């Protein structure tokens, strides 16, 4: 939500910029009659870890005058929102799992879930309890991706591996190969922690026939169908990067845009992807 360095303390020179970013996002919900929910991503932890995340949550809930506007609460990993008798939203703070807890000694002080093992137990319980319903699982990190965080890079990214600023044609390819093969970054799906998270969530979600993953993280639009689970990626609201349509990928678009998921009373789902000028790209 606050790209790229999270929410600073009041009085910090960067605070106004962070507030302006959130204000712009919150303004999009002004004409919306339903409930607006912000969920955390990795960059929201990049300013004092859990402390910065809670500063952001406090600002959003106050500005929207809604204590449920930022979920999960208190820097905890899991929330459930009942949308209807047949539809439930499960929100996972995936960065909570990927964080270095040694750097955040107060990480779980306000949470009932204290360990990663407890998290999986609670997640499994929610899936089983709602297995007859449509379950939308919203989390920042996707379980499947064909973008850079999934080891897929464009030619431009091979030449400009660092923020598209400095040309490093040979070194860039080596950097991207290292990312793809070593999983050195916890933000890449090849990372061992990320793999543990992905494998457990995907496995546990098989206990329900109607689960849909919705995520950001990648700066692209993607639709992937893998392991019998649909993955919607809508992460190009302000920045774009390429993605491929392989490994279960049904659609990808490396431009600015967003996805809209409609779920009907008969249980069917309709996913629409739009470009920045509101041009409909595809319906699935």
Image (cartoon, helix red, strand yellow):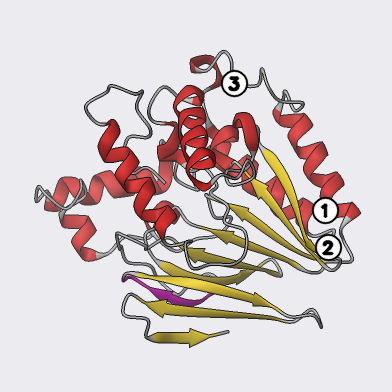
Q: Quadrant of the C terminus?
A: bottom right
Who is closer to the viewer here, 46 or 196?
A: 46
- The residue pinned by badge 2 equals 208
Left or right: 22 as drawn, with respect to 174: right
- From this viewpoint, is residue 265 visible? yes
Q: List x then y, in percent, for residue 276.
A: 33, 75
Left or right: 92 as drawn, with respect to 222: right
Label 2 and label 3: CA atoms lie apart by 30 Å
Q: List x then y, in percent, for residue 26.
A: 43, 53
- From this viewpoint, is residue 248 visible? no
Q: List x then y, in percent, for residue 169.
A: 13, 53
- The residue pinned by badge 3 equals 107
- Mark before the other along the chain sequence, 1 or 2: 1
Left or right: 181 as drawn, with respect to 35: left
Contact, CB < 8 Å: mark 1 with mark 2? yes
Does residue 251 show up magenta in the picture? yes
- Mark before the other along the chain sequence, 1 or 3: 3
Please say if 108 is above or below 172: above
Left or right: 41 as drawn, with respect to 83: left
Please say if 47 is above or below 204: above
Give the extent of the magenta segment.
249-255
């Amino acid at each position: 939500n606050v790209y790229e360095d999270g929410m600073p303390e009041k009085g910090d020179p960067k605070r106004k910029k962070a507030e302006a970013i959130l204000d712009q996002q919150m303004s999009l919900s002004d004409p919306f009659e339903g409930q607006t929910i912000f969920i955390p991503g990795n960059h929201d932890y990049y300013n004092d870890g859990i402390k910065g995340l809670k500063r952001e949550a406090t600002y959003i809930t106050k500005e929207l005058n809604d204590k449920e506007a930022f979920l999960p609460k208190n820097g905890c990993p899991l929330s459930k929102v009942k949308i209807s008798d047949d539809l439930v939203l499960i929100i996972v703070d995936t960065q909570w799992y990927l964080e270095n807890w040694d750097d955040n000694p107060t990480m779980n002080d306000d949470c009932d879930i204290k360990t990663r093992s407890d998290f999986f137990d609670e997640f499994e319980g929610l899936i089983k309890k709602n297995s007859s319903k449509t379950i939308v699982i919203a989390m920042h990190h996707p379980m499947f991706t064909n973008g850079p965080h999934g080891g897929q890079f464009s030619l431009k990214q091979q030449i400009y591996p660092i923020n598209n600023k400095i040309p490093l044609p040979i070194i860039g390819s080596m950097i991207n190969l290292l990312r793809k093969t070593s999983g050195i970054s916890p933000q890449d799906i090849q990372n061992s922690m990320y793999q543990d998270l992905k494998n457990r969530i995907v496995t546990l979600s098989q206990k329900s026939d109607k689960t849909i993953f919705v995520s950001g993280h990648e700066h692209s639009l993607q639709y992937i169908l893998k392991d019998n689970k649909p993955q919607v990626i809508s992460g190009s609201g302000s920045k774009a990067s390429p993605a491929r349509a392989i490994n279960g990928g049904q659609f990808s678009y490396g431009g600015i845009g967003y996805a809209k998921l409609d779920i009907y009373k008969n249980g069917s789902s309709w996913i629409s992807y739009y470009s920045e000028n509101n041009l409909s790209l595809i319906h699935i």
